[in-house]
Image: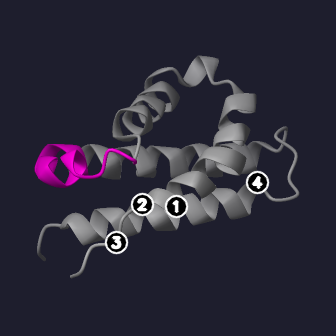
Amino acid sequence: MTAPGLSDYLDHVRQAACEAIEFVQGMDKADRRTQHAVIRCLTIIGEAATKIMEAHAGFVEVHPEVPWLKIRGMRNRVVHGYLDINLDTVWDTALTDLPALLARLPAVES
């Protein structure tokens, strides 16, 4: 099994973002299953972005339109600050920030 590459990590970001967006559609943020599902997606997005930042710094540098540090920061917040997660922020991220991220996320040829 080979280690994931840049295109794999970008695919992980895309897939988790699409899932989070889908999960919140028509759902109340009081639904605990949806909360956990969306938070897990944000964790995956943040992990993948961190891997991209660590292993593909040149790519990150030429794509400043992607808020790499904010993505990593959100991941850290939901993982390490799990007792104080603001669900309004989580929902706003899924409804507003993730569609914007998908629009800005660059493609990479395999």
Query: Which numbered dot is residue 24?
Result: 4
Highlighted range, magenta: 52-65
Vertical relation: 76 (above or below) 43: above
Q: Specify which label sits upstream in the sequence, 2 or 4.
A: 4
Image quarter (top left, top right, bottom left or bottom right) of the N terminus:
bottom left
Any magenta on residue 29? no
**Residue 20 percent across, percent down from the top left:** 63, 56
| Image coords of residue 80 (percent x, y) | 44, 23
Of residues 47 and 6, the one drawn nearer to the viewer in this rendering: 6
Can you tell which mark lies on residue 102? Answer: 1
Mark 4 vs mark 3, foreground winner is 3
Q: CA distance from mark 2 to mark 3?
A: 7 Å
Q: CA distance from mark 1 to mark 3?
A: 10 Å
Quadrant in the rendering for residue 90: top right
The residue tagged 2 is: 105
| Label 3 element class | loop
Question: Which amino acid type is shown beneath numbered disc 1?
Answer: Leu
Q: Above or below — where is 29 with respect to 73?
A: below
Assess whether mark 4 and mark 1 are in contact (beta carbons under 8 angstroms): no
Circles 2 and 3, Cβ within 8 Å, touching? The answer is: yes
Separation of marks 2 and 4 at Cα, in angstroms: 21 Å
Classify 10 Å Cα crowding around label 4: few (below 14), some (14-19), many (20 and above): many
Residue type at the position of mark 2: Leu
Q: Is residue 87 above or below residue 68?
A: above
Q: Are marks 1 and 2 in contact (CB under 8 Å)?
A: yes
**Label 1 neighbour load within 10 Å: few <14, some 14-19, many 20+:** some
Q: Residue at x 58, y 53 (%)?
A: 100
Does residue 90 appear left or right of residue 106 in this picture? right
Q: Which residue is mark 3?
A: 107
